[in-house]
Image (cartoon, rainbow, N blue to C red):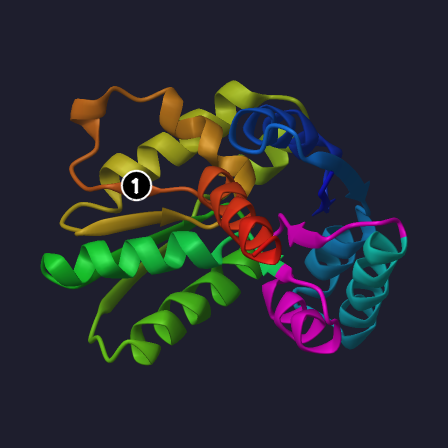
Amino acid sequence: MQTLALLHTSPTLSPLFNELTARILPGVRVLHFVDESLIKNTIAASKLEKATMRRLIDLVASTFDAGADATLVTCSSIGPAVDIAAQLHDKPVLRVDRPMAEKAVATAVAGGGRVGVLATLSTTLAPTVALVRRVADENGHQIEIAEHVCEGAFEAVMAGDGATHDRIVGEALTGRMAGMDAILFAQASMARALAALPEWAVAAPVFTSPELGVERARDVLADLLK
């Protein structure tokens, strides 16, 4: 039996990823690792610090020590550290937001090349925008990016007020992102807000990271068996 490790920075994401892995990865053993210090220290410092990067790298190593065949890091705020960890370990280390960025760029390029990025934390917005630009550059695409932080939404969902989080994100999605050819939700925790909106309210395709990230993990695990 293969094993996938999920490394979270908030315990609130475990139920969502339990549902996704049960559906997309039946027969794969799933191990959850949670360390809130990764995101809380990043928010407090308003940036991803080297100490946090070193901690993430050590935590990834611990997932492999526990028997994981691949590790999916579900937090986009620490994405740059995930890229470094991937270079230091022989087993796959995956960013949850990379597949989302690839899909959004491809969709936007097929239209007018305009990509909208919504986040509930500025510390997540910057690395997500950088990832979108990198994906576009790697594929030789020219894009325009509109970015916005949904102030107050992160604090609401962390306090258990999902309705307020969904309202703030929904208002930004339908108001700030007008005219986009593709829209990204920078954080996995934002995916829930999309379900609260009617399809007609959103003019462009919206990409979220959890399902696409788990699908990428499925493909990577399948490749390991070849």
The answer to whether residue 103 is visible is: yes
In this image, 59 relative to 172: left or right? right
In the depicted view, which residue is nearer to us: 27 or 131?
Answer: 27
Vertical comparison of 194 with 115: above or below: above
Q: Residues within 10 Å of mark 1 (few under 14, many from 20)?
A: many
Which amino acid is tagged 1? Val
Identify the residue at image location x=17%, y=52%. 181
Report the span colored magenta.
66-93
Left of 60 or right of it: where is 93?
A: left
Residue annotated with mark 1: 206
Residue at 55 percent across and 29 percent down: it is 20
Identify the element where label 1 is drawn: strand
Which residue is at 47% across, 59% downward? 98
- 72 within the magenta span: yes
Total numbered labels placed on residues in the image = 1
Would you say residue 162 sits in the magenta stretch? no
Q: Quadrant of the C terminus?
A: bottom right
On the question of residue 116 being in view, the answer is no
Image position, residue 39 (x, y; %): 72, 53
